């Protein structure tokens, strides 16, 4: 694990925390056998062990947590096959990295730090190509642990900024990671020495049926009309040591966009004395193994371009008006966010809050500015105290919404170098200028995630958990 900043001067050294586990045999899952409280601090620059942290000795849990077929048997055979076929081929066309599908067009990109990037998302509306987002990507993520135990308290990985999540992308396999009529894109990147590196089949693109888009049964006439929805899926999967993160962009026929993270893999486990029960985690067996509570917090950077470069952002709350003679009235109220500081916001489900990105110069049929709305699903923020080092380094995760005027150098919400940051870099530093964000070229940063209260079902391999948010047209179409 990266060391990060904990108030100690590393004197410019690139230090790593090597946690120690046991394998009883080559294929044994080591996460069942943590050697708790033993940490090797390794200097990547010198290639030497800097020190060894050895705290209270705890017996190594012996019970196994294996999941390979050789241990647990083959996969079930009682389910009949489901065949996903497109006899006439896929509906998309690809020219280089440019994609056209239904009314959508965009370009596929890939970077070492972000992984999959979508560029120049446009929607064809009655023959007119209308821009929606110029660039969208996962910009940062942080995984802080809530257990104050010596080993666990310093777990707070910035999987994008510290580890280059793009470089950890899997080469995807047909029938396992993706099914149907697939188009793969390679991830072109560099290794840690700067040499060119190709990750084959790093990005998967395919279509999926998505239930009904709309339906109405006219009971008076006995007629029914239904339209099926369909989505285009563009995805990649990264393995960060024990965890897998599968990232999906979904484009829908009605102009909606979804960003979805599917978290799976293996817990980063901890050991305690047999018979104990830590208040900061879930016992996974009776042999001293437990899974500490933690969070997975993501930030997505979206350079919006709703019908053009110059956009604004409104916060929309549902409120009860003061004049309410029937006691049944409620209404949605828009509030223009005029400066960066005013746009540092948290979600509020009690007000059914959402945010809409508008273009004041482009009007719809009822003379309102065209817009997309951001539905703040999974809108968690950091649980750690403001004084914690992880809070200082990941201040982007203390709020759900940030809005900045586009600046080429402002790319990553925790700053360029989160592993070496002592705190305050990125969004808090940029927004301190409190720049105007009305009718500007805007970047919207959305923070969301998963508060992972570990359960028994997450062991030995965690069933996928879905985390994400939606962007929907809001008066964008007539």
Image (cartoon, grey):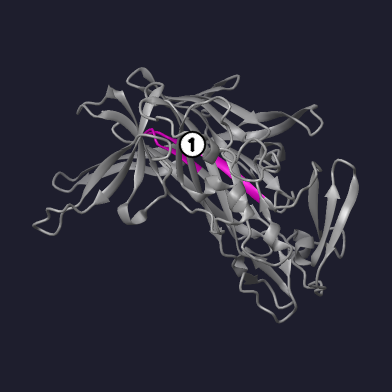
Q: Position of residue 269 (x, y in %)?
A: 71, 64
Q: Is residue 441 magenta?
A: no
Q: What x and y, as percent, mark residue 173?
A: 68, 40
Identity of the residue furthest to the bottom in this view: 275
| Nearer to us in this view, 451 or 464 | 451
Does residue 171 appear to the left or right of 313 in the view shown?
right
Question: What residue is at 91 percent from the left and 48 percent from the top?
Answer: 48
**SS class, disc 1:** helix
Q: Nearer the viewer, residue 11 or 3?
A: 11
Q: Is residue 269 left or right of residue 60?
A: left
The quarter of the image holding the C terminus is top left
**Which of the 4 quarters of the picture holds residue 193?**
top right
The quadrant holding residue 371 is: top left
Residue at 89% in and 51% down = 49
The magenta region covers 244-259
Question: Eyeballing the image, is 306 above or below 352?
Answer: above
- Residue 5 image point, x, y percent: 70, 49
- At 55% across and 47% down in the image, what residue appears? 395
Decide which of 442, 308 is in the foreground and name it. 442
In-image side of 211 versus 243 (left or right): left
Q: Main secondary structure of the magenta part?
A: strand
Q: Is residue 19 above or below residue 361?
A: below
Can you see residue 84?
Answer: no
Give the image quarter of residue 35: bottom right
In-image side of 241 versus 414 (left or right)? right
- How many neighbours does mark 1 have within 10 angstroms: few (below 14), some (14-19), or many (20 or more)? some
What residue sits right under mark 1 in the picture?
431
């Amino acid at each position: 694990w990266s060391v990060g900043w904990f108030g100690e001067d590393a004197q410019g050294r690139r230090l790593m925390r090597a946690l120690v586990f046991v394998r009883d045999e080559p294929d044994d899952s080591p996460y069942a056998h943590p050697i708790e409280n033993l940490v090797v601090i390794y200097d990547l620059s010198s290639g030497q062990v800097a020190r060894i942290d050895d705290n209270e000795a705890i017996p190594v849990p012996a019970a196994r947590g294996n999941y390979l077929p050789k241990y647990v048997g083959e996969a079930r055979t009682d389910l009949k096959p489901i065949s996903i076929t497109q006899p006439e081929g896929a509906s998309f066309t690809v020219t280089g990295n440019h994609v056209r599908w239904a009314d959508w067009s965009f370009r596929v990109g890939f970077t070492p730090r972000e992984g999959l990037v979508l560029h120049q998302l446009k929607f064809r509306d009655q023959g007119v190509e209308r821009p929606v987002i110029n660039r969208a990507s996962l910009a940062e993520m942080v995984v802080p642990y809530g257990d104050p135990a010596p080993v666990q308290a310093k777990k707070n990985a910035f999987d994008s900024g510290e580890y280059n999540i793009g470089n950890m992308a899997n080469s995807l396999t047909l029938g396992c990671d993706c099914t149907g009529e697939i188009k793969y894109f390679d991830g072109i990147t560099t290794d840690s020495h700067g040499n060119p590196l190709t990750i084959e089949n790093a990005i998967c693109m395919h279509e999926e049926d998505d239930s009904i888009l709309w339906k109405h049964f006219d009971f008076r006439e006995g007629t029914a009309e239904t339209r099926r929805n369909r989505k285009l899926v563009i995805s990649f999967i990264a393995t960060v040591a024990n965890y897998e993160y599968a990232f999906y962009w979904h484009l829908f026929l009605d102009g909606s966009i979804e960003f979805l993270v599917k978290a799976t893999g293996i817990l980063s486990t901890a050991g305690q004395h047999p018979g104990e029960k830590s208040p900061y985690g879930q016992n996974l067996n009776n042999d001293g193994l437990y899974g500490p509570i933690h969070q997975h917090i993501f930030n997505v950077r979206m350079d919006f371009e709703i019908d053009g470069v110059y956009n604004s952002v409104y916060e929309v709350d549902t409120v009860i008006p003061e004049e309410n003679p029937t006691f049944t009235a409620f209404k949605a109220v828009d509030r223009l966010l005029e400066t960066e500081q005013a746009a540092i916001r948290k979600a509020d489900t009690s007000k059914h809050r959402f945010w809409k990105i508008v273009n004041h110069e482009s009007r719809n049929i009822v003379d309102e500015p065209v817009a997309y709305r951001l539905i703040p699903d999974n809108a968690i923020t950091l649980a750690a105290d403001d004084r914690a080092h992880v809070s200082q380094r990941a201040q982007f995760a203390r709020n759900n919404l940030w809005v900045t005027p586009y600046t080429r150098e402002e790319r990553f919400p925790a700053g360029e170098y989160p592993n070496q940051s002592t705190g305050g870099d990125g969004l808090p530093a940029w927004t301190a200028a409190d720049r105007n964000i009305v009718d500007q070229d805007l970047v919207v940063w959305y923070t969301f995630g998963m508060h992972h209260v570990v359960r028994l079902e997450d062991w030995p391999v965690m069933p996928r958990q879905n985390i994400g948010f939606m962007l929907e047209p809001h008066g964008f179409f007539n």
